Image (cartoon, rainbow, N blue to C red):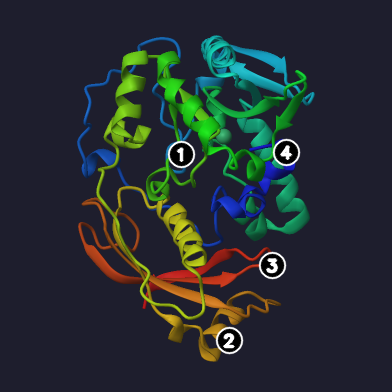
Amino acid sequence: MRKAVSLILAGSMVFALASCAKTSESAEPLKSHPEAFTEASVQYEKPKAGLDYFVLVNKTNKLPDDWEEILETVTVINSVGDTVEVEKQTYDAYLLLKEDLEKNDGIYLELDSGRRTVAEQQDIMDRFIEKYGADYAAKTVAQPGYSEHHTGLAIDLYFKLKDDDGNFTDVYYNEDMVQYPEIWEKIHAKLADYGFILRYLEEREHITGYGYEPWHLRYIGIVDTAKEIMAQDITLEEYLGVVKSIPVTVELGESGLYTTEELSDAIVQIKCKFAYWEGCELHAIRYAGDDANNKENLAWLNSLNEGSDYKELMKFVIDFHTPADAADNWEPDHEYTDYEFWLVRNEKGGWDIISYGKG
Ligand SMILES: [Zn+2]
């Protein structure tokens, strides 16, 4: 993601990519222990000292408390003049990747962003709470402590194109970068050779909590493991065994109101929300049909947010399974079916989750 503004408003800025870095209002993550519902697929030992290059930081796994004390970083300035901080070993590996791509593929990588401290994220959160209130802040600002960028092991790339006269042009904005799938393909093919993996894969939003991001790399340090993860096309969560790889059935049905693209964007939002429900397994998502977009339902959704004037809605239902030690109001080890998700069209043309629950 680029720049402070797009960082904190990522959900709306990159709507065209169906990304979902934002959280939503009533987001109360389920409290549970991941080991209760799945066994690790790998024998993985946390190092006794130093950085754990396999550390998992996502919407339900916080940055370890001592991380910032032991982290060593380097700071560089990129081609657009921004300062980027990256973990030392990660930066060395990035330089090798960059050199390889320049020499052999004519692709010129740049670092868009690297490490953000928890304190920086907290500052952003505090400013938003003061200015817009806690509800809005919770919806638009990533929770401090729960971003992989805190680790220093995650980097966002952009690249430069070289023309026949040897002049460079930055390809910098997300919406521009996605216009070059063939360049990303070449970059992705070499990541594992230098200990990197692609972190946010397509169709895995319910596991990672993020939409597809071709530019977001994660350094794990071990080339063989990186190759294994990339070859299997799995997420770090799946590799570490904290979630099972279970196919999700998606049924869009027929809609005279919405395009497949619009319905798919709404599904990405739902899956990103689902990633907070620790220990739950998503089985199916179904579009509930155009009939739900009626006056009565719109009036109900508008009544949930004072001053709102939503004009279009979508209803989906999902099937999912809770873990054996599910907390709060959830029934443990239970298959919930036809659990409802209600979304409305926002000012940017995308879809926001307004309500969810058992109908
Ligand atoms: Zn990123």
Q: What residue type is labelled 4?
A: Ala
Residue 54 in which image quadrant = top left
- Which quarter of the picture shows residue 194? top left
Q: Which of marks 3 and 2 is nearer the N terminus?
A: 2
Gap between marks 2 and 4 measured at Cα: 36 Å
Task: Name above or below for residue 218 compared with residue 274.
Answer: above
Q: How far apart are marks 3 and 4 (CA)?
A: 21 Å
Indicate which disc, 2 or 4, sits on the residue closer to the N terminus. Answer: 4
Q: Name the residue under label 1.
A: 200
Q: Which amino acid does label 3 sit on?
A: Glu
Give the amino acid at mark 2: Ala
Which mark sits nearer the N-terminus, 1 or 2?
1
Identify the residue shown where x is 52% and y is 34%: 182
- Which numbered disc, 1 or 2, marks the residue closer to the eye? 1
Q: From the viewer's side, name the closer residue of 41 and 97.
A: 97
Residue behind label 1 places its C-beta within 8 angstroms of ligand 1: yes
Other-residue count near label 3 (Cα within 10 Å), few / some / many at <14 / 14–19 / ≥20: few
| Label 3 vs label 2, nearer the camera | 3
Residue 53 visible somewhere in the drawing: no
Q: Are marks 1 and 4 in contact (CB under 8 Å)?
A: no
Q: What element carries label 1?
A: loop
Q: Mark 2 points at which residue?
A: 299
| Residue 163 locus on image (x, y percent) | 72, 25
